Image (cartoon, rainbow, N blue to C red):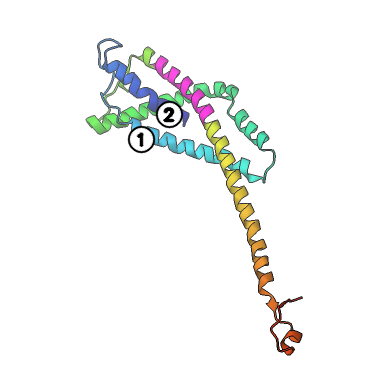
């Protein structure tokens, strides 16, 4: 998810800078960024799946120490783990970029254009820019997904609490209705020939 997001966000900026001639003369792009849209859609789907999968364990128990569950969510996506996974994320980002650009080139030109055109800039500059995008995107997504997961947990607990209150209130309302429905006329009152107030059934 982070790799796809970083590739999709960095690619149009790198290509725009190349097309503007900031990296000198030469052809470094295919002059198209149509591949960004499906990549961002895939990244959004992965982000939604991540939030759901992280929020479900926190909602599994009834209401045990919400603060501890939210703290565990923050620790799971901590800076130490992010730094450890950064090389793998960057490799996955480059692989995603290569697939995105190759598919786009086939769709536009009918065949891959070859070389390092998929990077969008001279190799050293492209690698540096994409590495920077990887670091920034990873840090921002870590905080954003943590905040979204905490919000999802709070919303889930609130909805469950409302549902439990409503479920508990329905039997009480039903019992009250049944108690009012069990009113009948006492036999002694009917023999007196006069209408008397009803007696509650025992």
Which residue lies at the image location 60% right of the left edge and 50% below the top edge? Answer: 162
Q: Secondary structure at mark 1?
A: helix
Callout 2–callout 1 Cβ contact below 8 Å:
no
Can you say whether 29 is above or below 183 in the image?
Answer: above
Task: Describe residue 94's horizontal placement relative to residue 82 as left or right.
Answer: left
Name the one closer to the observer, 34 or 91: 34
Q: Which residues are magenta?
A: 127-144
Does residue 63 lie above or below 177 as drawn?
A: above
Residue 129 relative to residue 154: left or right: left
**Residue 118 in the figure: left or right of residue 49:** left
Q: Residue at x 38, y 22 (%)?
A: 10
Depth check, front residue: 180 or 142: 180
Main SS, magenta region, reads helix
| Image spot of residue 111 (x, y percent) | 25, 30
Q: Answer with mark 2 or mark 1, whichever residue precedes in sequence.
A: 2
The C terminus: image quadrant: bottom right
Q: What residue is rendered at 30% in x and 27% in y?
A: 33
Residue 56: mark in rendering: none
Q: Quadrant of residue 43?
A: top left
Pinpoint residue 9: horizontal percent, then vertical percent. Answer: 39, 25
Can you identify the residue that label 2 sits on? 5
Which residue matches tag 1? 38
Q: Position of residue 129 (x, y in %)?
A: 40, 16
> Quadrant of the rendered structure where residue 186 is?
bottom right
Q: Residue at x 50, y 40 (%)?
A: 49
Q: Is residue 167 left or right of residue 88?
A: right
Secondary structure at badge 2 equals helix
Local packing at callout 1 (Cα closer than 10 Å; few below 14, some 14-19, many 20+) is: few
């Amino acid at each position: 998810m982070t790799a796809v997001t970083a590739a999709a966000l960095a690619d149009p900026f790198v290509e725009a800078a190349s097309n503007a001639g900031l990296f000198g003369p030469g052809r470094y792009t295919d002059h198209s960024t149509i591949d960004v849209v499906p990549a961002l859609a895939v990244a959004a789907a992965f982000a939604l799946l991540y939030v759901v999968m992280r929020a479900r364990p926190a909602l599994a128990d009834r209401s045990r120490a919400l603060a501890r569950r939210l703290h565990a969510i923050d620790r799971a996506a901590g800076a130490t783990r992010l730094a450890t996974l950064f090389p793998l994320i960057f490799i996955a980002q480059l692989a995603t970029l290569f697939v995105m650009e190759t598919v786009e080139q086939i769709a536009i030109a009918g065949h891959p254009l070859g070389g390092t055109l998929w990077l969008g800039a001279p190799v050293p500059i492209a690698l540096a820019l994409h590495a920077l995008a990887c670091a920034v995107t990873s840090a921002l997504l870590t905080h954003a997904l943590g905040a979204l997961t905490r919000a999802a947990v709070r919303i889930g607990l609130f909805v469950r609490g409302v549902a439990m209150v409503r479920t508990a209130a329905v039997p009480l309302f039903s019992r009250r209705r049944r108690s009012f429905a069990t009113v009948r006329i006492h036999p002694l009152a009917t023999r007196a020939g006069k209408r008397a107030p009803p007696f509650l059934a025992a």
